[in-house]
Image: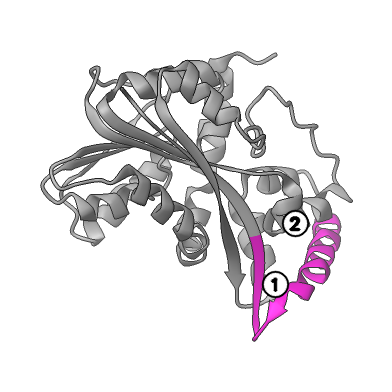
Amino acid sequence: MASAEEVRASQRAAWDGLSAAWDKWERVILEQLQPVGTAMTDRLEPRDGHHVLDIASGTGEPGLSIARLVPNGRVVLTDLAPDMLDVAARRAKEHGLTNVETRVCSADDLPFEDASFDAVSVRFGFMFFPDLPAATDELVRVLKPGGRLCASVWVDPDRNPWTSIAMQAIGSEVPLPPADPDGPNMYRCAAPGQVSALYASAGLRDIAEWDIGVELVTQSADEYWQVLSEHVSLAAAALRKADDATRERIRDRAIRDVRPYTADGQVRVPGLARCIVGTKP
């Protein structure tokens, strides 16, 4: 079994390798995930002057959107992958956001003092933490009393055809490693109440969870395949093991299977996420 540090090193390399694709497909990804970021921000209730910590920020969201709401506050974007944060820093500069800083660090070893932040957001990062209880404790440690932690995770693959269509096409040609139910993977935190229980064990109160629907919208079935094959880590890793002919067969199947989601000239594939919020007493 890989150690936590080995897992983090592997994740860092994988996500750094995807930073260019996340930058390339910014419009598509932002549109898909915006409902989740908005729902999280609404529950965090950031106010001007607040200090907010965004964990697993990747290329910057929802931290950059939160920064616009706290012009006299501070937003710290953190991630394991420095290349991802470089994109986030560039976007902050492009949007004239001067209250944003980036820090490369792990969620279970944060370089911040106790009770440093009024709110903590974790959009689609929770399920990738090597040690879920340790990371949750660390997020609560840096949260001020009365502050809120809000995270989002994906529910089961059957409710997320936007990714399962592509992964089923890949799996038809390339052996995929079985997901370790206790190790980092996209659907590790899909069970209702799982993250809420971690919150409660870490001392949070007034915990609530709710589901949010999303849509991945592309301009064609071919663009759908380009987006998924380039920015989803498991897909990109599996495709690197396939030869050209195999990749072409996988592409053809994914494009065939996603075409039923075409409407009004666009491909609109649904998904479902779960948001979980809690307050530090």
Q: Position of residue 242 (x, y in %)?
A: 80, 48
- Considering only order in the chain, which callout, 2 or 1, is on the residue closer to the N terminus? 2
Element type where label 2 sits in the image: helix
Q: Position of residue 249 (x, y in %)?
A: 86, 62
**Left or right: 76 with respect to 168?**
left
Question: Quadrant of residue 81 in the image?
Answer: top left
Residue furthest out toward the left: 72
Range drawn in magenta = 243-270
Q: Position of residue 217 (x, y in %)?
A: 59, 70
Q: Look at the picture and state if 234 lies above or below 216.
A: above
Q: Which residue is mark 1?
A: 222
Residue furthest out toward the bottom: 264
Q: Look at the picture and state if 232 lies above or below 120.
A: below
Q: Amino acid at mark 1?
A: Asp
Question: Between 252 and 30, which is closer to the camera in this rendering?
Answer: 30
Query: Exactly how many numbered labels are in the figure?
Result: 2
- Which residue is located at x 57 percent, y 60 percent? 214
Is 17 inside the magenta-drawn segment?
Answer: no
Packing grade of label 2 (10 A; few <14, some 14-19, many >=20) is many
- Which residue is located at x 58 percent, y 33 percent? 127
Element type where label 1 sits in the image: helix
Question: Between 119 and 7, which is closer to the camera in this rendering?
Answer: 119
Packing grade of label 1 (10 A; few <14, some 14-19, many >=20) is some
Identify the disc placed on residue 103: none
Residue furthest out toward the right: 172
Is 249 inside the magenta-drawn segment?
Answer: yes
Q: Which residue is mark 2?
A: 166
- The quarter of the image holding the C terminus is top left
